[in-house]
Structure formats: structure tokens, C-alpha cells
Amino acid sequence: MSTFLIEFRAVHTRSLAFAAALPVIAAVPLVAEFIQHVVEMRIGMYASPDAAEATADNAQRLYFGFAKVIALSLPAYFFFRWLHSGGGRDFATRIESPAAGLFALVLALQALFAWLSLFVWTDGPMGIGLFVFGLIFMPLVVRFVVAAPLGIFISPLQSIRTMAPHALFAILFPIIAMLPLMIVHYALGIGAIFVENEALKWAMLGLDSFVTAWLALVMIAAQHVIATSPAPIAASAATEAA
């Protein structure tokens, strides 16, 4: 439990440290979230509870939401490299091969899940099944995800084999790490529906954009924690590939 709490605090402090070191990169999720809020305000989503329900499946909102999912993932390339190098800015910001190509595979996988959940299997048994599958699958392939920006290829199958004994920790830790910020995120979004003053709505949505950006970084930091819990990535990649 003590290790769990140490890592819980670490993902929040590391995410803030990364934001301070590379603020432009850390701001990408913030901008993406705020743009989506602008779209949602324009379609009247925050006018009332009924309006929120009526516009939940608005095409503009869904397409911008899909783009936001990609934007939330973009800092991972730099954040993983920053963590791996112990805070090295030059290494973190270097776009190189094969790291960029491998990271593109990671983004493609995440984009596929986002597309299926937003536009294909949106509800019903298939929607629930996709959510549960992603909840289990992504933590198990996390070593593939974290190794990619380092230019190291660990196949999803190799990652699953390594992470399977640690599956419970891999699934639960990111959820618990994100929970405090998730509560604030949803409270601000729902609260903006019920307040009448438009300036206050914008203030709440602006604050939510900062919270979402921090939440994205916490998620990335949590992925790094669970990926490296069985063994450091670089030290074990060759063994896993054998």
C-alpha cells in the first residue's frame, strides 16, 4: 500500500513537473479541450439539462471529440521520453526514427478505439463490451505503448505476457490515479449546464480545460508507472523479444 501511495503522489507531481518543463507540449490537451467546449457552447449544449441531452450525439461535437482524443495522447511521445531520460529536455523533444514511427502505431491503435466507441459501437452490448475490452486490453499492452516513443519495439503480445501477472495493478492504478481529477472534470462540466450566467459557464469550462490537460498528463504518467513496474523498459526489451 505504501508503494501504491508513493506512486499515486508521483504521477501528479511528475505531470506538473513536465508541464513546467515543456509547457507548450503540455498545453496541447488544454487547447483541444477548450476548442471542444467552444463547439459545445455554439450548439447550445450548456443551455439546460434538456439541451445537453439533445446535443450529446451532435456530429460536430463527436468529430471534435475524436480529434480531442488524439490531442490528449500527443504529449505521451515527449512525456515518456522525458521520464525515461530523467527530465532531459533535448531527448524528450527530439523527433527521431524509429521512435516517431512506432508512436504513430500507438496513436493509430488509440484512434481506432476512439472511432469505434464514438461512431460504431456507441451503446448496447457491443458498446459495453468495447469499453470493458479497452479497460483490460490497454493496460496489458502498456509496455508496447511506453516503449514506442523510446524507439524500442515491444509487441502487444510480448507486453501482455509481461503484464499479465500484474494485471490487477495495471488496470486499477490508472483509474485510481485519475479519479480525483475526473471528479473535478465532471463536476465542472455538469455544473456549467446548471448555472445561468454565461460568463460563469465560460469560467468553469476554461478551468475544466486546465483540469483535463492535467488529467491527460496524469494518465500518461500512470501508464509509465505500470509499464515499468515489472522491469525497466530498456533493460528488458531484448529479453521480451527473445
Image: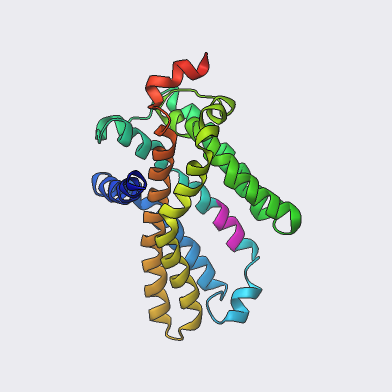
User: Which stretch is magenta?
Assistant: 61-66
- In the displayed structure image, the side of residue 46 where residue 90 appears, left or right: left
Nearest the eye: 17 or 198? 17
Query: Is 71 in the magenta?
Result: no
Residue 4 in the image, given as x and y percentages of width and height:
37, 46
The colour scheme used here is rainbow
> Quadrant of residue 146 in the image?
top left
Look at 52% across and 51% down and name the residue there. Answer: 69
60 up-or-down from 226: above or below: below
Residue 242, placed above or below residue 217 = above
For the image, the number of numbered tags is 0
Position in image of residue 10 (x %, y %): 30, 47
Residue 54 position, x and y percent, is 66, 74
Viewer-nearest residue: 105 or 239: 239
Q: Is residue 10 visible?
A: yes
In the rendered image, residue 62 lying in the magenta stretch gets the answer yes
Please tell me whether residue 139 is drawn above or below residue 13 in the rendered image: above
Secondary structure mostly seen in magenta is helix
Residue at x-position 52% and y-position 76%: 46
Q: Is residue 7 above or below residue 237?
A: below
**Who is closer to the viewer here, 180 or 41?**
180
Q: Residue furthest front?
A: 1
Q: Is residue 224 left or right of residue 15?
A: right
Q: Is residue 93 visible?
A: no
Q: Which residue appears farthest toward the top when viewing the image?
A: 242
Q: Farthest residue toward the right?
A: 125
Is 240 or 211 nearer to us in this picture?
240
- Residue 133 horizontal/vertical position (percent): 64, 45
Residue at x 74%, y 59% (from the top left corner):
124
Q: Is residue 120 left or right of residue 152?
A: right
